[in-house]
Image (tube, helix red, strand yellow):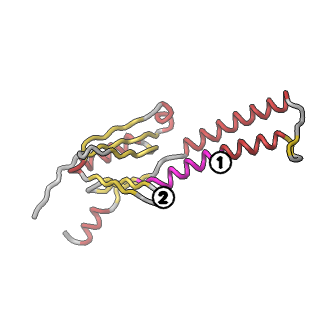
């Protein structure tokens, strides 16, 4: 096999990372709704209380901002820690930030593929893909954008018969 054709067979057909945008939007909206409700309750029922010379409302807003920031940090870590690469001859699932782990499945080791989509996942077009290998190991691709399309591409590659000529 020539170098150009071996590079071409190793080039990615599809790459992906967890799709966090719908989760980020949903969390932002929820935090804003709860924050507005709690601040409204404070304005309605609590007299102006000051802690360290700042009104209680500012402390409440600050706490909700920290909660939002923490939830966004979790999503960003999820995106940074996972990567999915589909090639002509394999599927690679990389996970981890400091210590990384690669799970590579070749068509000969592929056993089963399952797509899990929650109600909200169907609404926003995301879901999880669970891949089982013949060694009975599971690999999970979380928050995949358009998981049915990705699963179809994976199925095409993984169901292709392997022919070796020596």
Task: Point out the frontmost of discs 2 and 1.
Answer: 2
Q: Quadrant of residue 136?
A: top left
Identify the residue position indicated by label 1 in the image.
Answer: 69
Q: Quadrant of the C terminus?
A: bottom left
Q: Could you tell which of marks 2 and 1 lies nearer the N-terminus?
A: 1
Which residue lies at the image location 70% right of the left edge and 38% below the top edge? Answer: 32
- Magenta residues, as a range? 68-83
Identify the residue position indicated by label 2 in the image.
Answer: 97
Residue 28 as seen in the image, left or right of residue 13:
right
Check if mark 2's residue and mark 1's residue have beta carbons within 8 Å.
no
Number of residues whose C-alpha sits closer than 10 Å to that of mark 1, classed few (under 14), some (14–19) or many (20 or more)? few
> Residue 51 colored magenta?
no
Q: Nearer the viewer, residue 53 or 108?
A: 53
Residue 117 as seen in the image, left or right of residue 103:
right
Helix, strand or loop at mark 1: helix
Helix, strand or loop at mark 2: loop
Q: Nearer the viewer, residue 114 or 15?
A: 114
Which residue lies at the image location 25% right of the left edge and 48% below the top edge? Answer: 158
Which residue lies at the image location 31% right of the left edge and 55% below the top edge? Answer: 104
Secondary structure predominantly adopted by residues drawn in magenta: helix
Seen from this angle, which residue lies furthest left? 166
Residue 70 percent across, percent down from the top left: 63, 47
């Amino acid at each position: 096999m020539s170098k150009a054709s071996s590079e071409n067979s190793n080039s990615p057909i599809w790459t992906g990372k967890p799709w966090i945008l719908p989760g980020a939007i949903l969390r932002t909206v929820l935090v804003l709704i709860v924050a507005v409700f709690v601040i409204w309750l404070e304005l309605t029922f609590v007299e102006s209380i000051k802690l360290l010379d700042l009104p209680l409302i500012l402390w409440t807003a600050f706490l909700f901002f920290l909660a939002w920031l923490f939830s966004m940090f979790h999503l960003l870590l999820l995106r940074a820690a996972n990567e999915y690469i589909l090639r002509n001859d394999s599927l690679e699932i990389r996970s981890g930030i400091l210590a990384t782990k690669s799970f590579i499945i070749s068509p000969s080791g592929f056993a089963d593929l399952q797509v899990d989509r929650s109600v909200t996942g169907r609404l926003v077009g995301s879901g999880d893909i669970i891949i089982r290998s013949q060694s009975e190991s599971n690999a999970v691709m979380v928050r995949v954008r358009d998981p049915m399309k990705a699963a179809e591409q994976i199925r095409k590659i993984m169901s292709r018969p392997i022919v070796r000529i020596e």
